[in-house]
Amino acid sequence: MDNLGEIGTTEEQIELMDVATNFCRDKSPMDKVRALIEDDLGYDPQVWKEIGELGWLAIAIPEKHDGVGLSMAEVVPIAEQMGRNLMNTPFGSTTIAAQALLTGGNEAQQAAWLPKIAAGGAATMALSEDGGDWDLSNITCSGKQDGDNVVLSGKKQLVRWADSAELIIASIKVDADVRFAVIERSAVPEGALRRESIIDETARSFELTLDGVTIPADALFDAGRTRETIEKVELAAGLIHAAEMCGGSQAVIDYTLEYLKTRKQFDKIIGSFQALKHPTVDNYVEYEKARTHLYSAAHSWGEQGRGEVAVRMAAAQAHSSYSRAADRSIQFHGGFGFTHDCDAQLHRRKAIFDGALIGDAAYQRSKLAGLLFD
């Protein structure tokens, strides 16, 4: 943490990191992580209640909506420690939904939902469809005006924690224009949610069938703020997932080092072999680069232009670092590494899923190229 002060780490970030480090370590030991894989809900509801009581969901919500009044920068150390301990809860999806509301929602929508989120209510975004396109405006789900209501149709995929969410914000097209629809969980009919089998077994994801779901016309976001909302959602998701992946990188490197310091081959500790030492050092250097990019992005959050560049740099480096560190760990563990019992497997799967949600390192770099060289 020492080197991070040079790029503007706030006192609030440092305090939150201290609390989050202890909380996530204590509440999410690996045996519990593995036990929750078999649990339908996928997380401990008591831990989620405690997260709400700690005020973590209120951090980036303005005080007028019962929030703490800080920014996404202060969410970063919490998401980082959650990733480090594979603590998967609706925290990330809820925080992104709150940012969407703050950007595109009207005063009534914000007043109705932001205090609920700040108090610990879960929310999520429904953005992905069959095409798997990371362009959030390339969608087919639609809404048709019917008097004072809008009737929705189509299917959304990779809707994280949808069964726990009180609020789902879905992207749809109304008269060929992309809009965001505020859908109360109670408006989703029974059978409209189908749990998906995803590579990250510590997460929960659902397909959402919108056919026949009816919402009031005033449940749509402001049509004039769609572009701004898409941009904010992309940046919020990029920052949170970059933080989770940085934490995961640290954890999987620590896990690998422990193995290299204890496993013997030919009467030697295998960590003494150059073929294992050098890649491990490389992984650590890549992790440090990712973490520096992460806190630089947190520091630049909200700055026009510079903020997006910093977030995409952080997301690209974090995904690359996490994927590589987990992959090397699997290789170094030999035959055991290719079994489900190896913890590096869980990290490798999470790296793949995070990349699927926000765009992998190659995609983030392609977006960066456009920002830097156009």
Image (cartoon, helix red, strand yellow):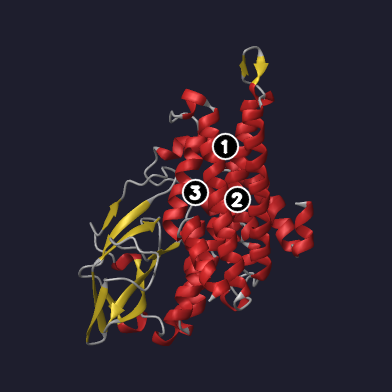
Give the mark nearest the N terminus, 3 or 2. 3
**Is the residue marked by circle 2 packed among few (<14), some (14-19), or many (20+) residues within 10 Å?**
many
Give the mark nearest the N terminus, 2 or 1. 1
Which dot marks residue 88?
A: 3
**Is the residue marked by circle 3 packed among few (<14), some (14-19), or many (20+) residues within 10 Å?**
many
The reply to whether dot 3 and dot 1 touch (C-beta < 8 Å) is: no
Q: Is residue 221 above or below residue 77?
A: below
Query: In the rendering, at what x and y percent does residue 39 appear?
Result: 39, 40
- Point 54% across, 48% down: residue: 47
Q: Amino acid at mark 3?
A: Asn
Query: In the rendering, at what x and y percent does residue 29 appear?
Result: 57, 37
Q: Is residue 327 above or below residue 72?
A: above
Query: In the rendering, at what x and y percent does residue 13 appear?
Result: 71, 60
The residue at which mark 1 appears reads as 29
**Secondary structure type for disc 3:** loop
The residue at which mark 2 appears reads as 246
Q: Is residue 349 left or right of residue 277?
A: left
Q: Amino acid at mark 2?
A: Cys
**Secondary structure type for disc 1:** loop
Q: CA distance from mark 3 to mark 2?
A: 15 Å
Q: Amino acid at mark 1?
A: Pro
Total numbered labels placed on residues in the image: 3
Q: CA distance from mark 3 to mark 1?
A: 12 Å
Which dot marks residue 120?
A: none
- Point 25% across, 60% down: residue: 192
Give the mark nearest the N terminus, 3 or 1. 1
Query: In the rendering, at what x and y percent does residue 51 appear?
Result: 57, 54
